[in-house]
Amino acid sequence: MSFGSRDVVGVEIRDDRLNLVKMSWSGGAWQALQAFSASMKEGQNLHSPDFPDFLRTQLSSIHGIKKARIWTMVRASSGKIWHVNVPRVKKDLYNAVYWSARKERSFEENSTAFDFRILGETTDNGSRKHVAEVYTAPGEDVRLLKKLFSRAGFSLEGITLPSFAVQNFFVNKWFEPGTEPCAVLKIEHDCSVVDIYKENRILLSRHIKTGLESMVESLQQNYPGTKSKFLFNEDQTTNKQQGVLSRDQAAHLIAQLEENQDLFNHDKGLENNSAGEIFSMITPALERLARQVERTMDYFVYSLNHQYPSRLYVCGYLAGVPMFTSFLEKELELDIRLLDPLDPSTSKVSPLISSLNRSTRMNLSQAFGLAMSTRVNTPNFLYTALDREKEKASRRISGFAAAAMILILLFTGAYWYHVRHNLHQVREKVTFLDHQLQSRTPLVTSEMINETAGQLHKEAAALRNYSRKFVPVAVISELTSSTPVNVRLLNVRLDMGRSGDGASAGRNRTVVVDGIIRGEESLFETYLASYLLRIRSSPLFADTVIHKSETEEFGSEGRVLRFIININLEQV
């Protein structure tokens, strides 16, 4: 796992509740640590002013939430996933995929969050092309989710789609994907989604209009009125017309059906409604759903030339109702399985979660998939392909800058070595001449004195020339050795005085040193005095004059003592 924190929290925001699951990566596998579902207040939604406080309260109940990575997702009905074949290009792959995707399915550039990932290569009309998995979501939804979590005091690691949350089960081998395609049916509030996977890859994702709302409408339309035992209590005030089922009452009956109760609560004004009768009234909507799933499978097989899926996983609304799974198994003639990743029979689920009933576990299944998200495996609308392109460009620029700096350092080092080598040769020559002078014992004559004086004059002139030539190197070397670690030199300027061979040549040579002193502010003057003492102890420097000494703010260094010192050089 590539990121620092091993804990990930998946947050699924539904119409009436908040589902949260915490997972941890340990020992090369995921472990489920905490999972719960919190109901929203009646009428509360993402746009409610009190929703960030509600979100903060629920997230704060997660142990170690401050160190965990938080993932959420947009509504299934809002996101779209499809595949495009893109010509192989060496540069600007992003634009190639973007315009191919827009040609395939039109979407608004400014209002759509767009991302893709390259899955591999294929042959299209005899040419090799990239296979890109493209996914979009409303940009407004992505911005709203990011803002809500920020107002709740938490930052999001990622925002993805429900299909990719389910895909995490196969990527992480929580469910064995097998070698044959398998389908997942997610029943949402206003639609359903059929995703067909092979191993750990989505081959097809399609939205179906039939969802929970369609079942509620079917229940209202097929409600038998006074001819059966579905009666309203006399004190029911929301709908006094006997035999008419309100939308809330119909939704309540379906919710009770999910909990598998034969006798339903009287609080909604309904008496003794059996699960079988409720199911029979929503059967027309379920038949439409089954036909749409069947047509999706046929398109997958006959138009896309894939093998028929071997099994169908079901999650979302009604997934935990045995009558529903039996109905689908009969209609579709497929192996129907529940997408129940939090089944307590698996050793990967903690004892805290094993006490949850099946209905609650089924509601948490997609949040569970979210909690296995990583930037490496899970598409993320907060870190898109465009962001990755910008990051690559930034890394390239940084690499060029680093290479240029290395070259400069190499050239500077070579020049420094050359200058020091020449200085060493001069010192050796001076030593040799000194030894020669000391070893000579000639008879002293006026001619010898004049000859020696002339020779010495020439050698002295040569030495002065060498001295002037290497004074800058000596000054820099002496300053470097005299400067302590808490002193940083910003600028060194050398004034060599007048040039020529006269008596005044080379006089009034000065060095202007501009620098800063770091450390404790109360000791700045002590540090400066110590530094001046070091400079004055050098045989190369004569008088020193402080031109400037004042405390100031200096960027990231903070408070420093800024100084400018004029140093007179000894006459050489």
Image (tube, grey):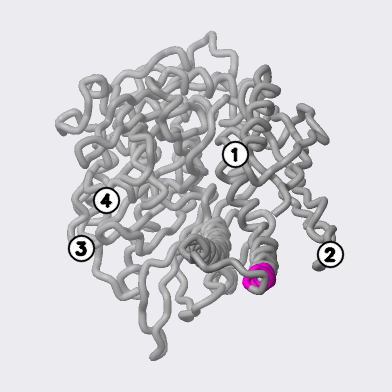
Residue 538's x, y, as percent? 62, 40
Q: Quadrant of the N terminus?
A: top left
Q: Which mark is residue 470?
A: none
Q: Mostly what secondary structure, the magenta segment?
A: helix
Mark sitting on residue 483: 1
Label 3 sits on residue: 180
Residue 350 appears at what percent x and percent y?
A: 22, 25
Q: Secondary structure at mark 1?
A: loop
Query: Which is closer to the viewer, label 1 or label 4?
Result: 1
140 relative to 47, above or below: below
The extreme bottom residue here reads 126
Q: Height in image: 427 above or below 526?
A: below
Q: Residue at x 50, y 57 (%)?
A: 80
Residue 315 appears in which quarter of the rendering?
top left
Residue 285 versus residue 102: which sits nearer the camera?
Answer: 102
**Residue on which the image places disc 2:** 502
Question: Label 4 near label 2: C-beta < 8 Å?
Answer: no
Q: Which residues are magenta?
A: 448-455
Distance from Cα at disc 3 to Cα at disc 1: 73 Å
- In the rendered image, residue 454 lying in the magenta stretch gets the answer yes
Q: Find numbered disc 4 in the image and state the secondary structure of the residue it sits on.
A: helix
Residue drawn at (52%, 22%) of the image: 40
Q: Which residue has dot 4 on it? A: 170
Query: In 3D space, how far apart are the residues under numbered discs 3 and 2 (Cα atoms)?
Result: 97 Å
Q: Nearer the viewer, mark 3 or mark 2?
A: 2
